[in-house]
Image (cartoon, rainbow, N blue to C red):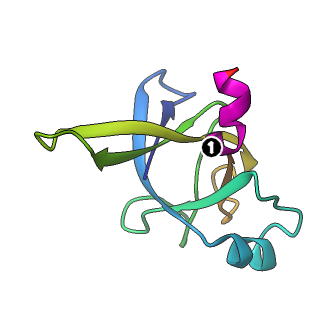
């Protein structure tokens, strides 16, 4: 998955590779109030570090995207998985929380 958004300091668009955590693992280790409408992600540990530990540095409104190859000619198709809602800021050593767009699809479609 890719997390994209604007860097608050430079107004540049940034993109980071992130890894989803299993719901139960995130709930037990980080956020006991995590709901099924939320996704918990950490950055690719090869890239994003704040100090000695990986962290998801996200800004409000950051999008979480996935890519699949669904067309007959195997072109990539990007889709929105989530929108950053809360969780880690830089240097907190915690995952970021995204609202799952799929949970609101019926409402979005209406």
Image quarter hosting the C terminus? top right
Q: Main SS of the magenta segment?
A: helix
Per the image, is 30 magenta? Answer: no
Q: Which residue lies furthest to the left in this view?
A: 73
Residue 24: x percent and y percent? 73, 76
Relative to 100, say whether 31 is above or below: below
At 58% across and 60% down in the image, what residue appears? 41
Residue 9: x percent and y percent? 54, 28
Residue 58: x percent and y percent? 60, 43
Mark 1 nearby-residue class (10 Å; few <14, some 14–19, many ≥20): few
Q: Residue furthest right?
A: 33
Residue 45: x percent and y percent? 43, 68
At 64% across and 30% down in the image, what residue appears? 61
Closer-to-camera residue (7/35):
35
Relative to 55, say whether 64 is above or below: above
At 42% across and 24% down in the image, what residue appears? 12
Left or right? Give the position of 9 relative to 78: right
Q: What stretch is highlighted in magenta?
A: 100-109
Secondary structure found at label 1: helix
Closer-to-camera residue (18/23):
23
At 59% across and 69% down in the image, what residue appears? 21
Q: Name the residue under label 1.
A: 102
Per the image, is 103 magenta? Answer: yes
Closer-to-camera residue (79/18):
79
């Amino acid at each position: 998955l890719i997390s994209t958004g604007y860097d608050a300091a430079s107004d540049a668009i940034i993109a980071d590779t992130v890894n989803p955590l299993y719901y139960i693992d995130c709930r037990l280790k980080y956020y006991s109030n995590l709901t099924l409408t939320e996704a918990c992600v950490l950055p690719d540990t090869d890239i994003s570090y704040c100090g000695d530990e990986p962290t998801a540095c996200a800004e409000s409104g950051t999008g979480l995207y996935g890519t699949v190859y669904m067309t007959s000619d195997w072109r990539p198709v990007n889709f929105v998985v989530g929108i950053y809602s809360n969780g880690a800021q830089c240097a907190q050593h915690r995952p970021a929380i995204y609202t799952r767009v799929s949970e609101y699809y019926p409402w979005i479609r209406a």
